[in-house]
């Protein structure tokens, strides 16, 4: 009986000790604040984007940036937001030839998708801004878009106690031009896409992911007959260059020349990524092509004469089946 009592006493003591250790570990476990550095979710086969050391992603920063992105508070009359043209359920563009700003003022260029914007170094169709952290200033101050003064935007946010609290949580600072621009860019860098059927075909060697027509379209895309790969290359299907692709003989929009002042840059615009291209019509800097059929026909013709037209453009001689196979392949680049 004595030995049994000792046994039970030792067991109780052991259980109490374990309970104290569990409680101690629970107390010592740091609470999550939302400010812990995160890693952006990058699909297989894609590099990790460059991220400034002063704007590492956290849960609070991304959440704040997302709220600002979809809040019309950034526009002068509080009627439109970034998300008014970059629609979340439509690959972050709006399928409009030209988007409308406040008071239905039409912009001058087509709204591109901003999926994978984290991989771009020079922004907008003409590359006029060299930092993602600064690109938000352009639409805010553009009279055809949000038509506001960035200083007044900040003053408006400073009067909003909810935003003041969220900025302090995310950046330990009050709303400012610095924290506003960085919160939105922190969210935008999270918009990474790379899970299409073609990605499954490449990464998983899943030959069933593409049809026979799409496989032939892929061959055309990456050989000299289709001749798409010189500009639309790499994991994001763009070399990020600026080229004149012969849409017009006379350009109403000077393109890259608007930034550089060089006549050789007239009519040169960013080579866009082709990811989700089948879902993001219309096409070109001014939305002048309504369908992929029109795009393929344009390149098949070799484009119009212009002194700055890329030397890569030439008549391709594609058959109707070739053109359809190319279009079908481009459809396989859409994210699920």
Image (cartoon, rainbow, N blue to C red):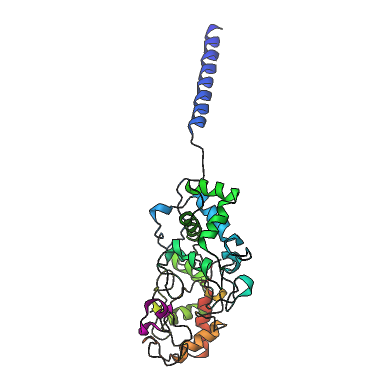
Occupied quadrant, residue 314:
bottom left
Q: Is residue 100 above or below residue 295?
A: above
Left or right of 302? Residue 73 is right
Q: Residue at x 50, y 27 (%)?
A: 24
Q: Residue at x 52, y 54 (%)?
A: 62
Q: Is 142 contained in the magenta span?
A: no
Q: Is residue 279 above or below residue 30?
A: below
Residue 224 seen in the current view? yes
Report the magenta residues as a range. 254-270
Query: What quarter of the picture does the C terminus occupy?
Result: bottom right
Q: Is residue 301 above or below residue 101?
A: below
**Horizontal and vertical percent position of residue 230:** 38, 79
**Horizontal and vertical percent position of residue 100:** 60, 74
**Horizontal and vertical percent position of residue 155:** 55, 55
Q: Is residue 141 above or below residue 154?
A: below
Left or right of 150? Residue 262 is left
Q: How many marks?
A: 0
**Horizontal and vertical percent position of residue 14:** 51, 19
Q: Residue at x 40, y 78 (%)?
A: 242
**Residue sitting nearer the eye, 149 or 308:** 149
Q: Is 259 contained in the magenta span?
A: yes
Residue 116 seen in the current view? no
């Amino acid at each position: 009986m004595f030995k049994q009592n000792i046994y039970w006493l030792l067991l109780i003591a052991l259980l109490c000790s374990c309970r104290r250790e569990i409680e101690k570990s629970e107390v010592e476990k740091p609470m999550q604040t939302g400010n812990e550095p995160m890693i952006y979710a990058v699909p297989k086969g894609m590099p990790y984007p460059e991220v400034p050391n002063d704007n590492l992603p956290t849960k609070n920063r991304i959440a704040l940036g997302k709220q600002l992105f979809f809040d019309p508070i950034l526009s002068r009359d509080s009627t439109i937001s970034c998300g008014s043209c970059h629609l979340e359920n439509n690959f972050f563009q709006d399928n409009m030839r030209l988007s409308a700003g406040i008071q239905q003022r039409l912009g001058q260029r087509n709204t591109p998708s901003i999926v994978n914007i984290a991989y771009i170094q020079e922004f907008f169709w003409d590359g006029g801004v060299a930092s993602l952290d600064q690109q938000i200033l352009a639409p805010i101050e553009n009279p055809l878009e949000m038509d506001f003064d960035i200083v007044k935007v900040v003053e408006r946010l400073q009067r909003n106690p909810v935003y003041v609290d969220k900025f302090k949580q995310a950046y330990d600072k009050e709303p400012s031009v610095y924290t506003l621009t960085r919160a939105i860019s922190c969210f935008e860098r999270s918009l990474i896409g790379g899970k299409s059927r073609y990605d499954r075909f490449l990464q998983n060697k899943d030959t069933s992911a593409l049809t026979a027509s799409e496989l032939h379209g892929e061959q055309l895309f990456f050989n000299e007959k289709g001749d798409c790969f010189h500009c639309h290359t790499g994991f994001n299907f763009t070399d990020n260059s600026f080229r004149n692709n012969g849409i017009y003989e006379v350009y109403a929009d000077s393109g890259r020349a608007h930034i550089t002042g060089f006549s050789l840059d007239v009519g040169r615009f960013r080579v866009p990524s082709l990811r989700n291209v089948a879902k993001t019509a219309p096409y070109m800097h001014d939305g002048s092509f309504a369908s992929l059929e029109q795009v393929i026909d344009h390149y098949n013709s070799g484009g119009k004469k212009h002194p700055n037209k890329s030397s890569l453009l030439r008549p391709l001689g594609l058959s109707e089946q070739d053109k359809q196979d190319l279009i079908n392949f481009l459809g396989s680049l859409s994210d699920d």
